[in-house]
Image (cartoon, helix red, strand yellow):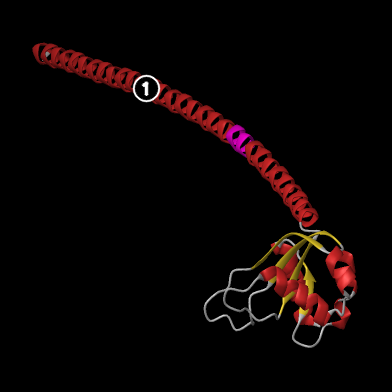
Amino acid sequence: MNSKTRSGGANSVSGTDEGSVENMIKSLVKKVDTLVTKDNLKSLETKFDTGIQRIETSVESLKSEVREVKDMSNELQKSLEFERNRVDKALEEISKKNAELEEKLILLEKHDRKYNILIYGVEKKQNEDISKVVYNFFAEQLELDEEILLSVRFANLHRLRSYENDKRGPPAILVKFIHYRDLIMGNSYKLQSGFRILSDLPVVMKKERKTCHHSL
């Protein structure tokens, strides 16, 4: 009886020790797992935080570069706008000066032609003496007497160039007076139909006169 009791007691103690050891091992394994998991999490968190920081740094750097590019673009745009305005202003000034010069040239040309007249409608003859043609024209058409005609002096006179198939009539006669031009122009109202005497003007003014004549 006593031996059985001892035997049973030994088995009970042995079972208790084995259970304690097993529980201790499980507890240690659980702690190890817990430690490993925490370490892994910390490592992952650290890596994640580091990655996020790098991304944020890269984003900020990219934003900074974008701002710099925008600033450069704005400065370039302003510079181009300034240059464009400067060029436009210079071109406008040049255009204005050209217009002024053209006007002055026209006035100079008009002054140079102030003693000139153009006679239209006088038939052209072969080997004609243009001086006699003009004197006869003044005598017949303007009814000027011989004394006045002898006082009229020319600096130059000639037929203008004629063009083929020109249906406007015979080429005009250009007469440059030394004096008495106003006398001739003052008697031009006596001209018969088909003849005209006009002031010699620069080409631009001739075109304007022609336009006004056609609009009447």
Quarter residue 178 falls in: bottom right
Secondary structure mostly seen in magenta is: helix
Quarter of the image with the C terminus is bottom right
Quarter of the image with the N terminus is top left
Q: Nearer the viewer, residue 89 or 210?
A: 210
Q: In the displayed structure, would residue 154 be above or below residue 128?
A: above
Residue 43 locus on image (x, y percent)? 35, 20
Q: Nearer the viewer, residue 100 or 147?
A: 147
Quarter residue 144 falls in: bottom right
Judged left or right of residue 83, residue 116 is right
Q: Which residues are magenta?
A: 74-80
Residue 9 locus on image (x, y percent)? 17, 14
Q: In the displayed structure, would residue 80 be above or below residue 170?
A: above
Judged left or right of residue 216, residue 65 is left
Residue 208 locus on image (x, y percent)? 75, 69
Residue beneath disc 1: 47
Q: Nearer the viewer, residue 161 or 64?
A: 161
What residue do we see at 25% from left, 19% from top? 29
Please state the total of marks drawn on the protein image: 1
Residue 106 locus on image (x, y percent)? 75, 55
Whether 78 is among the magenta residues is yes
What residue do we see at 62% from left, 74% from top? 128
| Secondary structure state at the residue bearing disc 1 | helix
Q: In the displayed structure, would residue 104 be above or below residue 24?
A: below
What residue do we see at 67% from left, 70% from top? 130
